[in-house]
Amino acid sequence: MEWWRTAIIYQIYPRSFADANGDGVGDLPGITARLDHLADLGVDALWLSPFYRSPMVDGGYDVADYRDVDPVFGTLADFDALLARAHGLGLRVIVDIVPNHTSSAHPWFASGLHDRYVVSDTPNQWQSLFGGPAWTQLPDGSWYLHLFDPAQPDLNWGNPDVRAEFDDILRFWLDRGVDGFRVDVAHGLVKPDIAELSVFDQDGVHEIYRGWRKILDSYPGERMAVAEVFDTAPDRVARYVAADELHQAFNFDFLEAPWDPDELRRIIDASLAAAAGVGAPPTWVISNHDRHRPVTRFGDGIPGRRRARAAALLMLGLPGSAYIYQGEELGLPEVLDLPAEVRVDPQFIRSGGTALGRDGCRVPLPWEGDTPPFGFGAGSWLPQPADWAAFTVEAQRADADSTLNLYRNALRLRRPAATLTWRSAPDGVLCFETDRLLVAANLGGSAFTLPREPVLASSPVGGTLPPDTTVWMEKD
């Protein structure tokens, strides 16, 4: 079976993982120095958010050079060292590719090659996902499209130069030895006629990915690609992971699901059916660099923590592949009280501060010690809460009941599963069995009498399954 069908993949946001050179910003050598944490955790692969040359208007998702490392993160030699160390530890490496747009500092845009971007003499009413109009005027009077920030002009995938360039970019990183790509805004590359209202998920994107699949398949080692496709129905998402296209697509329905048993079961069933229809693995995720952390999203204080732990065990018990965002394994909360002057997310800036944006889930990780920056480096580009001492890797490794050890134990006990069968359970309880495990998650119903002793529980149990708790049990 291909490795990616059941893999646990850990997302690293490089600015916030670990800082080796003491400038307060995470970097590639910092990641390399901390890879033992991922090997100890038990994941199969890591995904690096962009580390390319960039003005960093949108945290590196505004790329100026797709074939080089931004100096803030290091050098190509540093990347090669990271890749070698990861492979030495048995970890595969996936890198972000950003094909929907470049930076406005990219040589194409800066030199006026605007035929390689989406330009119109008559802009429509499309709005940027970061707020405000999606069009900005050029000196010649025409308008260029930016579905995100004005510093991120959208590429024209009808231009053969764009297609050839990205084919070459893929080969550049595959030749260096990467194991795959995470495709940013995968459903946005092909734009409709500007008279249409719907911007995303145009049928023309599939021709692009069929070409990319041929490139990936031409390399040994089961290279793969995972698509970011949001606000799209499961049956439409499944088209991106047909046998001749990409390998996985993120499950945003599961990520955004409320803490509701009926809705979660509906989403799980729809996800399994859509993936099975095209022979692809389902994927599961409860957090990433663009969403509030689950501890905060699921509720304040202790209820949020219990639910986040229960959600993690539920996710890791499902068949398929799962993604873990850095800090999720530590149970980090969203940092909601960052001062306005330190926030850099364009969502916050373009909204005039009415939208907090994504900085709160990007606060650097706490590794050890009792005071900030908790071993992250000599400083921290976003301030860490003073009470994060209890969340450090060092503190949690020594605590048998910590969230870190819950994840470690789950990944140690987890076995790839091919099937899921629902079992009867009281209202509010989801109960299913896979090839090896019986999983029960109480999402707020009455206490559920357990048929046997659990091998793992998200919270303490004593013969019954309390609310906001998930357990794994051996099958009969």
Image (spheres, helix red, strand yellow):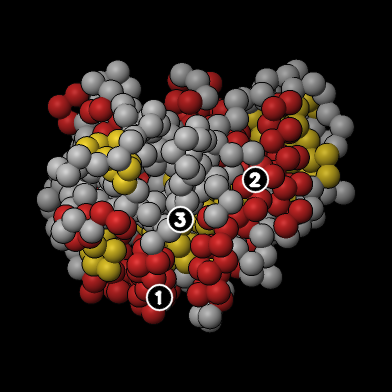
- Tell me the element at label 1: helix
Q: Is residue 442 above or below residue 230?
A: above
Labels 1 and 2 touching (C-beta < 8 A): no
The residue wearing badge 3 is 183
Q: Residue at x 40, y 75 (%)?
A: 171
**Left or right of 272, for residue 305:** left
Residue on which the image places disc 1: 171
Q: Is residue 366 visible?
A: no
- Across and down, in percent, residue 29 comes to 24, 63
Tag shown at residue 133: none
Instruction: Give the x, y percent position of residue 107.
Output: 19, 61
Left or right: where 427 falls relative to 285: right
Residue type pointed to by label 2? Arg
Disc 2: CA contacts within 10 A as few (<14), some (14-19) or many (>=20): few
Question: Please, what secondary structure does the residue beneath circle 2 have?
Answer: helix
Residue at 50 percent across and 20 percent down: it is 299
Report, in whole angstroms, how far the alpha carbon at label 1 lies from the one at label 2.
Answer: 28 Å
**Element on which disc 3 rests:** strand
Does label 1 or label 2 sit earlier along the sequence? Answer: 1
Name the one closer to the observer, 297 or 367: 297
Separation (CA) of disc 1 from disc 3:
15 Å
Q: Is residue 203 left or right of residue 390?
A: right
Q: Residue at x 68, y 31 (%)?
A: 264
Tell me the kind of residue under disc 1: Arg
Looking at the image, is mark 2 or mark 3 nearer the viewer?
Answer: 2
Displayed quadrant of residue 246: bottom right
The amino acid marked with disc number 3 is Val
On the image, which quarter does residue 268 sit in? top right
- Residue 2 picture location, percent across and down: 64, 70
Residue carrying label 2: 236
